[in-house]
Amino acid sequence: MSADLRLVGAALGCWFAAIGALFLPAAAGWALAGGALLVAVLWRFGRARWIVAAAAAGVACGAAATAARVGERDAEPLRGLAVRHATVRVGLVITDDPRLGRAHVGRDATVIVPARLDWIDTGEQRIVLSARVLVLAGDRGWLGLLPGQHAEASARLSPPDGGDLGAALLSVGAGPVPVGAAPWVQRAAGTLRAGLQRACVGLPAEPGGLLPGLVVGDTSRLDPDLADDFKTTGLTHLTAVSGANLAIVVGLVLAMVRWCRAGPRMAAVVCVLALAGFVVLVRPSPSVLRAAAMGGLALVALALGRPRAAVPALAAGVLGLVVLDPELAVDAGFALSVLATGGLVLIAPRWTQALEDRGWPRVAAEAVAVPAAAQAACAPVIAAISAGVSLTTIPANLLAAPAVAPATILGLTSAVLSPLLPSLAAFAAWIASWPARWLVFVAHHGADVPAGLLPWPGGTGGGLLLGALVAALLAGFRWPVVRRWVLVAAVAAVLGAVPVRFLAAGWPPRGWLVVACDVGQGDALAVSAGPGSAVVVDAGPEPDPVDGCLRRLGVRRVPLLVISHFHVDHVGGLDGVLRGRQVDGMLVPAFAEPAAARAAVLGRGVPSASAVPGSALTVGDVRIEVLGPVRPVTGTRSDPNNNSLVLAVTANGIRVLLTGDAETEEQLSLLPLALRADVLKVAHHGSAYQSDEFLAEVAPRVALVSVGVGNDYGHPSAVLLARLERGGARVMRTDQLGDVAVVRDASGGLAVAARRS
């Protein structure tokens, strides 16, 4: 049975027009809407004229809806106040759950609060208006607010970044002044969510923090390392309320209703009621309503016994949601919801049937076809965002799928029981924790798969390229010869993407050569120079982390301490290296800035010498060559960075290039030298100030990135990481993995290992 595609053109036209109109002045958006409306009314050419007319009508709807809201966004006096960065008193309505942003080094995390601005008091006048804003608050008291609740605060206005419907950014230092209570729906949801959290208190930390995320999207207690592993393995969607959650709940209700032999219309009514109740529980924020519309429309169409109506329902949902909220057009979550639902209703049934025709049982066919179809549909957007194509997503989702529904249903039962029967709720949560533990197991082990993320061009171009490739493959899969070639290419890609093995041994791994210590936002590396001995390059920003790293490695003697340059994130932890260890000598750069830090380092009493470019020395079995700086570099963005010592270290036949914080200028000056290395310590914590020519000359198999979690600088650069991965390097980051070791394994090959902090 073919799909009904009559509304698809209108939905796509509306979507793309909204994207364009968000970046245009309101007048240009209205002009686009008027032109499209004329085309829709007057077009009379060709047999497929209704397709053009429908698409043009969709463009008119999307452009008009967006232009109207862009006009509101850019209206005075709010725009002028934001440009002047005025400080005003504001009245707000919270529109979505407040959440913590990423913590920054030395600073508390910012609370991010989506809100609607109701009025502004400038001190001279009170202005009533309605505008979408984003509050950036430094006080955690904002986390206690619920969607729909009114609040007042003093705020400093700033212009928005553009590309959305936000009229201003509000910087707030103090806590909010709540005005009245939240709506009863939000209070009821809050009671059930808090009850689920209480029921999970006695569970182990990882499954106990995961379960509320699975059930209601509450990730406040989710372990950060586990969250990273969920992201790596493509399981993040499990911890955000999405069509999958709704499908589980409504699917269970639908099965029960059909078991009771209810008719299609009764089934549809009960499904809608179940959907509404679940939305109340997880809070009817815009993201939840979006997921409800995407998943609910298709499910109701199927419940009515009209599977051909699923695609028109999906298209109508896209059209309606974009008209109601044009900002969804540039929301990656919205695109993923639409694509995943489209994959489920268009691709999954065909693949399921194809597998059944080849003798697969129905359950097994659906278990493979459903996640594969969703992943194929979503892959272009994911590639555009992450600059990579995951090889672990489909296997991880296949392994996780059997546990998701039991965990969700039992967790939901726990939440519903919590207000009246807390003991029974805790028991239900304990049972639910067992499938949740399986999900934790899958995430941790999936994240450790070597080369689980294939590099791919990021951005819109990369997404369109992969989308075209996926479409071509879907069309070509009808022919057996195409399927065979795709299988061969996939196997070759997987094998070719694993140049370096990942060891799962204890710590420290046997045969370690170089370890990048997890010292936060800074550098500290150890190069093995024999039992209990290591050359140490830089010391990180604080003493305790580098001391702990060296203790774990069993380093009691440092025959040579190298300081790449005198910034505090490289020398602040010097006392940690000296703590209880014999340090025989120190090699420092000739560049003397910053002078105060240089004096403090040299004042420790360790014999020191200035490095000479072109010189070499041997420490045990380690050979160290000083490559740079070739000459003093001045007048750059950061002269100390561009005068960092750059060393080529050879240990047990493995060549390692240590680059300090050398930026583009110093890297370019090194190009005439022999730079090829097996391992690259990526300069300046993975900043964007890197030379492509330099990276091409080094051509590393392993790239070590020493970087701190949630740092202020945006390190490491996603573009740089994608560039390294495209060049065949396995990227190892201390912010994600902790201490990272390069190892010469028993077979003589290169391997890596990590110790999670």
Image: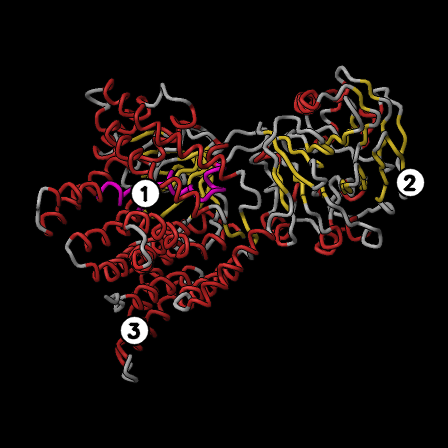
Foreground residue, 621 or 599? 621
Q: Which mark is residue 118?
A: 1
Is most of the magenta stretch helix, strand or loop? helix
Q: Is residue 236 magenta?
A: yes
Quadrant of the rendered structure where residue 189 is? top left
Query: Can residue 586 be seen here?
Result: yes
Establish if 597 lies above or below 680: above
Mark 1 against mark 2, which lies toward the viewer? 2
Q: Where is residue 272 in the image (x, y as percent from the top left)?
A: 17, 46
Q: Position of residue 675 (x, y in %)?
A: 79, 49
Q: Residue 615 carries which label?
A: 2
SS class, disc 1: strand
Residue 33 placement, left or right of 80: left
Quarter occupied by the N terminus: bottom left
- Give the mark nearer the N terminus: 1 vs 2: 1
In the displayed orientation, state which residue is furthest to the top.
580
Mark 2 against mark 3, which lies toward the viewer? 2
SS class, disc 3: helix
Quarter occupied by the C terminus: top right
Q: Position of residue 529 (x, y in %)?
A: 80, 28
Identified at 49% across, 61% down, the residue is 486
Q: Which mark is residue 574?
A: none
Q: Residue 37 carries which label?
A: 3
Residue 312 placement, left or right of 76: left
Query: Please, what is the three-letter code of the amino acid marked with disc 2?
Result: Ser
